[in-house]
Image (cartoon, grey):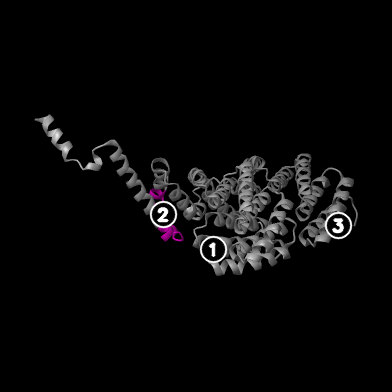
């Protein structure tokens, strides 16, 4: 009876389930329906972070299933292109890297070169966040080759923009400027507002590296209105951050604090974790410069709470650096040393020359605080050599002033020679704060020597 019942049940099965192939077909149809839902939902809610939060795991599962079981390459590609901005803004970089790799492979199976170029650029951006510097350049260069072959101006501009950002992060400012300047006329001819705004922001960075703060403000003022008109809160946060840093360097500290606050508001409004972390870091650095180490430390702890889960090595290194400086100002050398050494190691891995120079300078200041003046001199010389390699005169002048201060405790003749170099550079650049520090140092040296 049992066997007979089983046979009857088998005969009652729908035809589609009566064979392995039929079951496979039904399963594939189920996967395709899930993929279609994922794509439709992603498109409908691409600018709604909270809605995407609710379905994120289902969307990713649908991408994986479409790739693994249904060969639905077009769905994988289209979903990846649709939700990339959301995944990047939210900081889901480790998991998203794997899905972008799936999407790149899917685009190649389709022979969809434009999609492959876009996805390679997206993958490069994610790997940049994760500190994989060598593969980042290779990915963007491959994307640039694809778009040049297609004569796709928008793709060329985007690839050069991303290459510029990567070289800027590594302190190769001449290479960054080369890519930004090559992309600008193409974007201007095409009237591509979004790309133009990002390029204007990129150009402001290249002037920042040279200490040309009025030029930073000029380029940022060109980028800001476009970002506001397009509702690009992430770019607007970046522009406010850039302008705030320039105002700080120009001595307009009240305006700088206001702009950093606006950057935080924009980033929070748009769910931009990276922009929020940068704003926290910038405002903390300004407060440290004003000797307000307690509120600065609170901001830096908030920043670490953002960047540590994301794994953004660049932001993490700079947070550790400023944490070290905060502890130094608080008179706590042990945690200061710990954080600065962490920062130095990450920046070395990232090949971040500018960042390495910053940390070497701060390590020198920490040694000087502890009376280890020869060790401080060694760190200052390391920072100076890195600044000279970059051609960063304003930052180099600051290091020279610190070096003169350490040499004051050791070798007066050498101190005067370094102070003369620092004064000539600071006068040419109009760095009033550095000139004031030099005057104080020279007055101390004269007093010690018994001169009026």
Disc 1 versus disc 3: distance between alpha carbons?
A: 41 Å
Question: Which residue position is annotated with label 3?
Answer: 424
Q: Residue 225: name its quadrant.
A: bottom right
Q: Nearer the viewer, mark 1 or mark 2?
A: 2
Q: Nearer the viewer, mark 1 or mark 3?
A: 1
Q: Is residue 165 above or below residue 8?
A: below
Question: Which residue position is annotated with label 1?
Answer: 233
Q: Residue at x 75, y 53 (%)?
A: 395
Disc 1 versus disc 2: distance between alpha carbons?
A: 24 Å
Q: Is residue 226 above or below residue 364?
A: below
Residue 235 in percent (x, y) is at: 58, 61
Q: Residue at x 25, y 42 (%)?
A: 16
Nearest the camera: 360 or 437?
360
Q: Which residues are magenta?
A: 43-59
Question: Which residue position is annotated with label 2?
Answer: 39
Residue 114 in percent (x, y) is at: 55, 52
Q: Residue at x 41, y 54 (%)?
A: 39
Q: Residues within 10 Å of mark 1 (few under 14, many from 20)?
A: many
Q: Is residue 346 left or right of residue 302?
A: right
Q: Nearer the viewer, mark 3 or mark 2?
A: 2
Disc 1, disc 2: CB below 8 Å? no
Asked which secondary structure carries label 1, the reply is helix
């Amino acid at each position: 009876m049992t066997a007979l019942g089983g046979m009857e049940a088998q005969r009652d099965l729908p035809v589609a389930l009566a064979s392995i192939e039929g079951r496979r077909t039904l399963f594939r149809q189920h996967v395709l329906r899930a993929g279609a839902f994922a794509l439709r939902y992603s498109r409908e809610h691409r600018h709604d972070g909270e809605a995407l939060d609710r379905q994120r795991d289902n969307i990713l599962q649908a991408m994986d299933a479409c790739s693994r079981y249904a060969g639905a390459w077009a769905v994988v590609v289209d979903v990846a292109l649709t939700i990339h901005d959301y995944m990047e803004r939210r900081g889901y970089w480790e998991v998203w890297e794997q899905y972008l790799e799936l999407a790149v492979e899917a685009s190649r199976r389709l022979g969809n070169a434009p999609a492959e170029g876009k996805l390679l650029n997206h993958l490069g951006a994610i790997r940049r966040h994760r500190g994989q510097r060598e593969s980042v350049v290779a990915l963007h260069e491959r994307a640039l080759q694809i778009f040049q072959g297609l004569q796709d101006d928008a793709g060329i501009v985007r690839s050069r923009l991303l290459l510029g950002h990567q070289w800027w992060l590594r302190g190769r400012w001449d290479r960054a400027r080369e890519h930004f300047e090559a992309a600008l006329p193409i974007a201007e001819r095409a009237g591509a507002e979004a790309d133009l705004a990002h390029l204007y922001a990129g150009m402001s960075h290249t002037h920042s590296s040279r200490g040309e703060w009025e030029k930073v403000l000029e380029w940022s003022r060109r980028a800001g209105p476009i970002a506001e008109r397009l509702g690009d809160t992430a770019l607007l946060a970046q522009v406010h951050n850039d302008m705030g840093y320039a105002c700080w360097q120009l001595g307009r500290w009240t305006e700088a604090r206001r702009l950093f606050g606006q950057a935080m508001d924009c980033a929070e409004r748009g769910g931009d974790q990276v922009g929020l972390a940068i704003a926290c870091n910038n405002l903390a650095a300004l407060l440290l410069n004003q000797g307000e180490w307690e509120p600065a430390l609170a901001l830096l702890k908030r920043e670490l709470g953002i960047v540590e889960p994301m794994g953004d090595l660049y932001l993490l290194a700079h947070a550790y650096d400023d944490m070290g400086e905060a502890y130094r100002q608080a008179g706590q050398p042990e945690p200061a040393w710990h954080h600065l050494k962490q920062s130095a190691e990450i920046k070395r891995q990232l090949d971040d020359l500018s960042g390495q120079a910053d940390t070497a300078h701060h390590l020198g200041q920490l040694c000087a605080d502890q009376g280890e003046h020869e060790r401080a001199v060694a760190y200052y010389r390391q920072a100076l050599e890195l600044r000279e390699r970059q051609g960063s005169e304003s930052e180099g002048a600051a290091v020279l002033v610190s070096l003169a201060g350490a040499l004051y405790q050791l070798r007066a003749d050498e101190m005067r020679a370094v102070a003369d170099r620092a004064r000539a550079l600071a006068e040419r650049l109009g760095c009033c704060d550095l000139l004031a520090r030099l005057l104080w140092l020279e007055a101390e040296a004269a007093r010690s020597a018994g001169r009026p």
